[in-house]
Image (cartoon, rainbow, N blue to C red):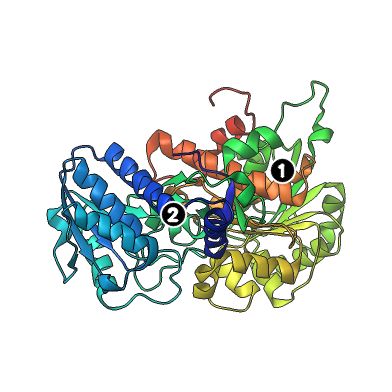
Amino acid sequence: MTELPAELWRAEQVREFDRIAIEEEGIPGFRLMSWAGRATWAAAAARWPRARRVAVICGGGNNGGDGYVVARLAQEAGLEVTLFHVGDPTRLTGDAFTAAQAARKAGLEPRPYEGDDLGEFDLLVDALLGTGLNGEVHGSARAAIEAMNKAGRPVVAVDIPSGLHADTGAVLGVAVGSSVTVTFIGLKVGLFTGEGPDRAGEVVFHDLEVPARVHAMARPAATRLSADRELPERLPPRARTLHKGGAGHVLVIGGDTGLLGAVRMAGEAAARTGAGLVSLATRHTHAPLIAAACPFLMAHGVERGEDLAELVERADVVAVGPGLGQELWGRALLEVVMTAGRPLVVDADALNLLAEAPRQRADWVLTPHPGEAARLLDTEVGVIQSDRTAAAAGIQERYQGVCVLKGAGTVVQGAAEEPPAIAVDGNPGMAVGGMGDLLTGIIAALMAQGLSPEAAARTGVALHAAAGDAAAGEGGERGLVPTDLLPWLRRLANPEGGAP
């Protein structure tokens, strides 16, 4: 097994790498299949050493061939193996046929899957459908997937959970929920976005000894965005002579009547991420409440758009949207911001207003959740979630700047010629109101400290996710609230520092 690489690929690209490895690098296809089976069995045996009864469910392609190798190795290890096939095994060809014949010679005779209860086994191996799946799963394959999910047993998926689209992470009708996915040659985009993180479980990678020069022939479809790579590079120690002006001035605009919390949390996040000055423009009734609770935030009561101009002029970066609302007050403030010429982070209701009157800028970061993304593209949430990287690219193309499409596997899409980055950190505890307000403040603070919009978006997403994981590690995911992340933002924004 090898460390997870940064690069993510589409299924067609990985198939081309496989072809090049066989036809141009001279690696026999059956050797690749054998290595894939060995890698899968090694991962399974290491995690479930007490398993004694194993069911291997094989399909009719090379994914099934990998499964036949796994079944034979499990039997050689002394386990009781039941080998199921879906489809006609007499139609197997090439390396998959060779693998099936080797399994038969070892005494493993595959039997058709006919609705068997899989709950009697200790471990299930999903070698049913591979990365070539594009249509909805039907028939016996669907029945087998549903049985695997119903069994309540650990599942090891070969290359990709059956039923998961390798490029988008969409579930094609039904998909296996695996405990571990052992994937080969190149990491597939769909394992890390959409439903992929939930279905794939732990992802284990093996390059099958395909030379790195094979991958160098193509541009990745996306990259993995993780805190351990991003934060040390983007957040070096500060100069000893730094002053508050050198750390940037962030202005957060929002907090219409009854929506005070959003703008305050965005401001606190900006401060904890290192902005030298943080100002808030909010309703008059809110300003003294914020000043009393957070004296490091300079809260200003603003009731008219014309009252905002001076505050915007003093700021290096403006974050607009948290608690802004869509009434006359929010619309007036947003219009001032749009014409002021300051770099922007745009979130929440500011995005909904932008969807009504689209415009383009190079110096802004848009941070929609799927619902806001659907409005920005005038489509449905289901369309956004069915291909999140395409949705982020569509928003960036229509509005320019940088798009941060939030959700499991947050997608950061900068300049169109660059591949998107997909966050691999974060946890379900962060699915709570207010987390997006923190992210808005974080990205704005990083821009104010000199990072480009794209670098700030990437680093901000990584920092936000890492803080969420650290906070969940202390007290669990359920019941996590946005303010739990604040001390961790400070800690993680200083990679050389200590505990909060």
* Corner quadrant of residue 308: bottom right
Question: In this image, 402 relative to 147: left or right?
Answer: right
Q: Which residue is mark 2?
A: 197
* Corner quadrant of residue 362: bottom right
Question: In this image, 320 relative to 390: left or right?
Answer: right
Residue 399 shows which numbered tag?
none
Residue at the location (51% across, 65% down)? 168
Q: Position of residue 379 (x, y in %)?
A: 58, 78
Name above or below for residue 499 compared with residue 318: above
Seen from the viewer's position, the closer of residues 48 and 427 is 48
Q: Which of disc 1 and disc 2 is earlier in sequence?
A: 2
Q: Position of residue 221 (x, y in %)?
A: 62, 59
* Corner quadrant of residue 394: bottom right
Residue 445 shows which numbered tag?
1
Question: In this image, 434 relative to 148: left or right?
Answer: right
Q: Mark 2 to mark 1: distance in Å? A: 29 Å
Question: In this image, 288 relative to 20: left or right?
Answer: right
Instruction: Report helix, strand or loop for mark 1.
Output: helix
Q: Position of residue 172 (x, y in %)?
A: 40, 72
Seen from the viewer's position, the closer of residues 328 and 61 is 61
Residue 326 visible in the displayed image: no
Instruction: Report helix, strand or loop for mark 2.
Output: helix
Q: Quadrant of the C terminus?
A: top right
